[in-house]
Amino acid sequence: MNGGRARPKPAVVATCGAVAAVLFMALFRLERLGPLDFWAGLASSIVIVVALGFAVDRGYGTRVREDLRSGLLRKVGIGVVSAIALYAVFAVGRAAALELFPFASEGIGRVYALRSGTPLFRIVLLIAFIIGPGEELFWRGFFQENAGAGPGRAAGFILASLLYTSVHLASGNIMLVLAAAVCGVFWGWLYMRYRSPLLNVVSHTVWDLLVFIIFPF
């Protein structure tokens, strides 16, 4: 897909990754950004890094439009099915973690505590239109795509998975870090397999809605 396009320089991609790391690590550490609560802070951070990605990768908009023009229903279908499959993995993983790790229940509870005091409808809107789509547009569609511009796409997959997992370390929540690691590898593989920002956006957004809104654990 657009194999001959001009790509942003590695230093530029690395800088974008560093900006994302600073923003997300601050958010996960403080659970807010200045006057913004967690959800508003997360949405604002995502808007910033996605805008940065599109600004430095001039061909990204064209790539997304091309992605939307081909196999739309198939990509949406795979995205939905993959989200359900990932939810099932987490359901099994949660049951195992509660049996094996004494800290699991507290860690999972801390994740859901982030919803406290925030209207559910607001969270749904932010997940559906900014958080779910934006995370994939940046982490996989921009960062993984461009970090893997060298010998093979595996490099981008590894770097994106590691950075995506690492920013969650600031939370101090082992369960959140483990969840991020599983999701990072899963969505990274999905992007490496299909190379479709749209497919990943659907998968991530549907999974977020399942986990946080529809069938929370």
Image (cartoon, grey):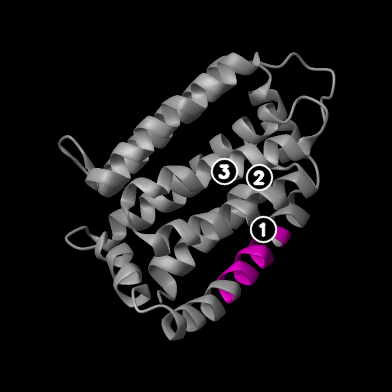
Q: Which residue is mark 3?
A: 162
**What residue span does the magenta drawing correspond to?**
78-88
Give, as a three-letter code, the residue at label 2. Leu
On the question of residue 209 being in view, the answer is yes
Q: Quadrant of residue 59?
A: top right
Which one is in front in this view, the residue at disc 2 or the one at disc 3?
Answer: 3
On the question of residue 130 being in view, the answer is no
Q: Residue at point 75% right, 13% down?
A: 6
SS at badge 1: helix
Mark 3 surroundings: few (<14), some (14-19) or many (≥20) residues within 10 A = some
Whether residue 52 is situated above or below residue 114 in the rendered picture: above
Q: Which residue is mark 2?
A: 198
Q: Residue at point 41% right, 60% down?
A: 176
Quadrant placement of the N terminus: top right
Q: Residue at point 26% right, 48% down?
A: 38
| Label of residue 79 in the image | 1
Q: Earlier in the sequence, mark 1 or mark 3?
A: 1
Q: How far from the left and from the top, in percent, is residue 124? A: 37, 57
Give, as a three-letter code, the residue at label 3. Leu
Marks 1 and 2: in contact by CB < 8 Å?
yes
Mark 2 surroundings: few (<14), some (14-19) or many (≥20) residues within 10 A = many
Lateral position of residue 25 relative to residue 140, left or right: left
- Outermost residue, bottom side: 99
